[in-house]
Image (cartoon, rainbow, N blue to C red):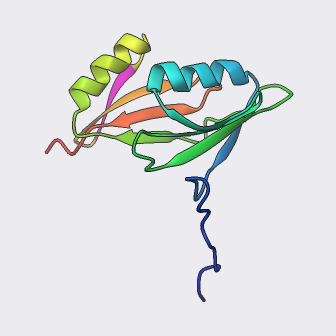
């Protein structure tokens, strides 16, 4: 079996996004911009597509009219080889971020305003 014959867009830097629902769109958008510093590929009053500065990934979130759905089964993870600097800056921007260990990696852990688990992992610290 072969892949679908997708022809990627040439007018917009987007190949794939995973979307999740948020009951407070403004709070989620503010957190993504001010705490993490993500770049917005697209933004409207109820929908945003975010990426990092290098456009290595995208994901999106959309206003959900109803109680906030449980997002705890999902997990947004970023990986870095400069964990100390990233963790220090994340602590400054997001008081209450936790430091956890898994095997030989440190993990900065918090949640977005919508409750999406958000982690930043260190490189292998063997």
Q: Along the line of sight, which residue is nearer the eye, 12 or 87?
A: 12
- Residue under the image location 25 percent in, 31 percent down: 83
Residue 113 visible somewhere in the drawing: no
Q: Residue furthest right?
A: 65
Q: Is residue 5 left or right of residue 46?
A: left
Q: Along the line of sight, which residue is nearer the eye, 1 or 16?
A: 16
Residue 53, located in which quarter of the rendered image? top left
Q: Quadrant of the N terminus?
A: bottom right
What main secondary structure does the magenta stretch of the protein show?
strand
- Residue under the image location 39 percent in, 45 percent down: 54
The image position of residue 32, as x and y in percent, is 54, 26
The image position of residue 99, as x and y in percent, is 33, 24
Residue 43 visible somewhere in the drawing: yes
Magenta range is 98-102
Whether residue 115 appears in magenta in the rendering, the answer is no
- Residue under the image location 22 percent in, 26 percent down: 84
Residue 29, located in which quarter of the rendered image? top right
The image position of residue 61, as x and y in percent, is 67, 37
Q: Quadrant of the C terminus?
A: top left
- Residue under the image location 86 percent in, 27 percent down: 66
């Amino acid at each position: 079996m072969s892949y679908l014959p997708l022809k990627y867009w040439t007018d917009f830097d987007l190949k794939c996004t995973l979307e999740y629902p948020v009951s407070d769109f403004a709070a989620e958008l503010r957190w993504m911009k001010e705490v993490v510093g993500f770049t917005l590929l697209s933004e409207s009053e109820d929908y945003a597509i975010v990426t990092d500065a290098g456009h290595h990934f995208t994901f999106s979130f959309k206003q959900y009219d109803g109680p906030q759905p449980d997002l705890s089964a999902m997990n947004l993870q970023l990986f870095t080889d400069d964990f100390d600097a990233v963790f220090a800056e994340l602590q400054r921007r997001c008081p209450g971020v936790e430091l956890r260990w898994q095997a030989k990696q440190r993990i900065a852990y918090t949640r977005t305003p919508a409750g999406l688990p958000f982690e930043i992992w260190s490189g292998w610290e063997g």
